[in-house]
Structures are given as C-alpha cells and as structure tokens.
Image (spheres, helix red, strand yellow):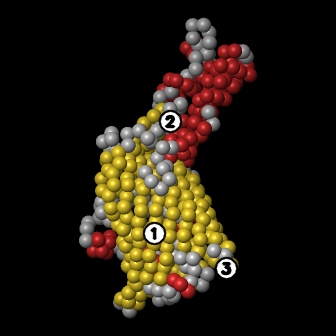
Amino acid sequence: MLGLLIAGNMRLLRSIAARVAVCSLLGLSLPAQAGPNFGIYDARTMAMGSVSAASANNDNAQFYNAALLAFNEEIEERTQDGRILLPLLVAEFSESALDIEKISQDGISQAISGSISGFNAMPNANTAQAVVSATGNLDAYLERLDGEDLRADVFLGMGLSEPGKFQGAGFFLGVRLLAGGLSTISETDRALLADYQEGLLFVASGGDDGQAHPELFDANGALIDPSNNLESTANAIGVTITEVGVAMSKQFQLFGGPIAAGISFKALDVETFEDTQRIVDDRISVDQNNEAETHVNFDVGLIKEIGSNWRIGLAVKDVVPHDYKTSLGTVIRLRPRPRIGASYQTGSFQVAMDVDVVESEPLGIEKPTQEAAVGAEWLIDAPFKLRAGYRHDVLGNRDGILSAGVGAQWKRLVVDAAYAQGSDSRSAALQFGMAF
C-alpha cells in the first residue's frame, strides 16, 4: 500500500473548552464531523501520543497551536530557542494497507504462478505441495484483509520558528497525503483458493488427504493458473494537501494571568484522487482520476496559563470549510478540526492530554474516529529527552496506539525520532533540525 498510495503523489513539497466556546471563538456552528483528523506533523508529537494543543513547544507549535510561541520571557537574540526543522517525515499506515503492499512487493501471486508452472513441468508430491503453500499464503492475506479499512497518512515538510519575548512567529511548508478506503474480498476468490489447496493436497498425499478437483485442470491435464481470475479489490480515496503557511502569536494579560492567541495563514493546493483496482496483480494508481484546487485558509489557537505549571489550550485547524470532488464525483469534505488540551510542566517533566472536540469524517468508506490522547516528556539530561504516549478512539472504531520516542541535541544539531503501533496500524517519524 506504500507504493499504491504514495507513488505519483508524493511530489516533494508540492502537489480546553466546550463546543460552545469553540463556536463563540469562530463565530460559526461546527459540524458534527470535521473532515480528516487533526494531524501529526513531527516526531515529538507522535512520540507523545499526538498531544499538541497545549503542549507543543518552540520546535513545532506553528503546526498545531501558534499561540504556544508566545511564552518566551527573553528576546530571541539572547536564546537559542529558534528552530529550523528539515526534513520532517511522518508516516502512518494501517496493517491492511501494509498487507496489500506485501502482496505486491513479495510477489505472492507470482509465487502461485511459479508453483503451478513447476507442477506442470514435473507433477509430483513436492511440486503439488508448493502449490498448496503458495495458494494458502495468498488466502491468509485475503482473510486478514476481508472488510478491513485502508488508511495512510504521510507528511513530508519543514518548519521554522522564532519565539520572541511574549510573542513569536513561524513558517511551515509541507505536503500531507491522506488516503482511506476499504478492501473487498470476494468469497469466490477464497473458495477458489481453497479448492486449489484441497485439490493439490490430494495429489501431494497420494489421495490420503484433501479431495480431487478435476475442474482445476485443462483438457490437456495441465493445472490452470488462477491468478488472472481473482477479483478481490481495494478502493482508495484521498487528498494530497500542500501547505505553505506563516504563524504569529502574541501574549496578553487577561483575567489575572497571561493568555496567548495565535493564528496561522496558509495557502493550500489540494489534489484529490480515487481509484479501485484488483488486489492481485493490479496496483491502485493515485495518478488516475485527479482533481486539483488552490485556496487559502487559516488556523487559530488560544492558550491560558494557570499558575506556573498548567496550560489550557484550544486549537482549530482549517477554519474555512471546503468541499473537494474527485473526477469520479466523490465529495471529500475538509471542515474545521477543533482540539482542546491541557498540560502540566514541573521542572524537567511534562504531561499532557488532548481531546478531539468532534469526529473526524472518513475520506472514503472507512469508519470515523474521535481521539483522546495522553503523553509525557522527560528531560533526563541536558541533551536527551524521553517521550511516550497513548491514543484512544473514543468511538471504538480503531484500536489504541502506544508510542515512544527520543530527542537529542548536540551543540546546534537537533534530532528526534518516534515509533507508534497498535494492533491495526504502525507509524514512524524522523526529523533533523538546527537551533539558533
């Protein structure tokens, strides 16, 4: 699925409040569903379970809540709190998507054809057993894929931030590929593969096991290759979003304490795609059925400091709603995506929690989600940070995801890495940067 969802689209850098409070801030009524999820754009956030609304820092706040850039107490010339992050690479795939990629990359269908050619050239117990193994291997993949959601979320980009005294600014540039869909496994395909396993086991065992299936052989007695007759399919619908944005923030004194507001203005180039192909042999080509559109949008954020340790945050991405159509007529909805969060920092330790205010609408026919997340970061020594987190879908449509990561700084070089895994997905992130 890596190839079928990325190939042709990953053109480098191109192609805490209630809902009432959110509505008051934006002056609009939020939908029950909010389009794609809030997003993970860097390794620190992935490692901490996706928390970001109140816990992002000078490295990454421009991607999540620009207001967090306004909490420095010194002018930028006296610190090294500015960051240039290049490159940022974040990738998350469902296990079903990875399985489809393995079917192609590991040559599962070609193994069936090869074993059948071997049997026809020299029919014996060993070559018959090879056909049993090859068809059984593909059948195991199809069993796992039956009715499973397909998901991919990949981001490649860069970021720059320069926090100042009680204010800050940032810049970001990147491309995010989001895709979703569903695998549809044909019962006829699985029945046919079962017949091959049963029929060739009958040959391999000399008639002691399995059952004869003469219909699998042609008039000349040669075993027929079933690969071209398998009709199980995978559908992919998605978008490639290229963003260029500028973030700015300012801190004020309000209600007896500091509060910061931030806004990010951005230009987006959005390209949709949709295609359906056979899982065996054919590849979903996201170059097909593309539609592109360019427009502007903005993100907003608020942070309220409570005492010297607590922060409460609200962030809303893509405030202006947009609908996009694939050339096949499917509508992909991009809606405001509000998230609330809280963080607690004491010395070298930070813990945070985020919650999506509304559901994330699926791109295709996969199930919606609504995430709650917790994460922590521990500065164990001046250059090293350990991070961990957990994401949970409160709708119960996806399994929980555990994550962990590290960060290190040597002189001005900054390196961060993260890995996350659930029973139905895997994710990884890596980034490099410079402090200035």
* Residue that protrudes farthest toward the top in the picture: 220
Please report whichever mark, 2 or 3, sits nearer to the chain's N-terminal start.
2
Where residue 300 appears, x then y in whole percent? Answer: 36, 71
Please identify, in this view, whether the residue under mark 1 or under mark 2 is nearer the observer.
1
For the residues marked 1 and 2, what is the alpha-carbon distance in whole angstroms?
A: 36 Å
Q: Determine whether 269 is above or below 281 in the image.
A: below
Identify residue for label 2. Answer: 283
Q: Determine whether 403 is above or below 197 in the image.
A: below
**Which one is nearer the viewer's eye here, 300 or 296?**
296
At 39% across and 82% down in the image, what residue appears? 250
Check contact, mark 2 vs mark 3: CB within 8 A: no
Identify residue for label 1. Answer: 171
Specify the label residue 91 is tagged with: none
At 69% across and 25% down in the image, what residue appears? 130
| Callout 3: SS | loop
For the residues marked 2 and 3, what is the alpha-carbon distance in whole angstroms?
A: 48 Å
Q: Amino acid at mark 2?
A: Arg
| Callout 2: SS | loop
**Which one is nearer the viewer's eye here, 435 or 301?**
435
Where residue 232 appears, x then y in whole percent? Answer: 48, 32
182 to the left or right of 135: left
Mark 2, other Cα within 10 Å: few <14 / some 14–19 / many ≥20: many
Asked if residue 14 shows in the view, the reply is yes
Please report whichever mark, 1 or 2, sits nearer to the chain's N-terminal start.
1
Q: Which quadrant, please, contains the C terminus?
A: bottom right
Give the image quarter of residue 396: bottom left
Q: Amino acid at mark 3?
A: Ala
Asked if residue 208 shows in the view, the reply is no
Q: Determine whether 286 is above or below 78 in the image.
A: above
Identify residue for label 3. Answer: 382
Mark 3, other Cα within 10 Å: few <14 / some 14–19 / many ≥20: few
For the residues marked 3 and 1, what is the alpha-carbon distance in whole angstroms?
A: 27 Å
